[in-house]
Amino acid sequence: MSTFSAKPAEVVHEWFVIDATDKVLGRVASEVALRLRGKHKAIYTPHVDTGDFIVIINASQLRVTGAKPIDKVYYRHSGYPGGITATNFRDMQAKHPGRALEKAVKGMLPKGPLGYAMIKKLKVYGGAEHPHTAQQPKVLDIAGISNNAVKREAAQ
């Protein structure tokens, strides 16, 4: 029996929506990175993009534990001497909701062309509305992420 290798044309990318209300940043990011890579599928092939599209809503209500709202610092550099800027989690969430989640997920994906293609399948929105209803995304219940995990609708 030979090893199965998925072909890019054979892969079916599904759409999922995750409600990030009161979820912990790192736990959501690790689950999202796993699904963007496609490691939850039986057809996973390391050199093929087998992952799904993920839409995250209510990213402005993500939380971190302990003193991390103030202590967790994100750095960026302009490229000029003395051009480093630091922002903590609380300020980043206030100014750009969801950017901390995007950075966390991006750090968990492979670097290179395949990783860049995977991160493009992540759509993050600070509020409850998103423009991807035409794709009919399925609600993804990430049980165990927090005590307030969103329960799957009874109709599904």
Image: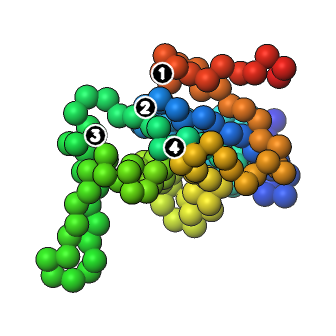
Q: Earlier in the sequence, mark 3 or mark 1?
A: 3
Disc 2 and disc 3 in contact, CB within 8 angstroms = no
Q: Is residue 64 visible?
A: yes
Query: What color scheme is it?
Result: rainbow
User: Mark 3 and mark 1: span between their CA atoms?
Assistant: 17 Å
Report which residue position mark 3 lands on. Answer: 69
Q: Earlier in the sequence, mark 2 or mark 3?
A: 2
Closer mark to the observer between disc 4 and disc 2:
4
Badge 2 marks a residue whose secondary structure is: loop
Please name the amino acid that badge 2 sits on.
Val
Report which residue position mark 4 lands on. Answer: 59
Q: Earlier in the sequence, mark 1 or mark 4?
A: 4
Q: Quadrant of the N terminus?
A: top right
Q: Earlier in the sequence, mark 4 or mark 2?
A: 2
Which label is found at residue 24? 2
Badge 1 marks a residue whose secondary structure is: loop
Which label is found at residue 146? 1
- Which residue appears farthest toward the bottom when viewing the image? 80
User: Mark 2 and mark 3: span between their CA atoms?
Assistant: 12 Å
- The crowd level at tag 3 (other Cα within 10 Å; few <14, some 14-19, many 20+) is some
Please name the amino acid that badge 3 sits on.
Pro
Please name the amino acid that badge 1 sits on.
Ser
Q: Is residue 25 above or below residue 134?
A: above
User: Mark 4 and mark 2: span between their CA atoms?
Assistant: 11 Å
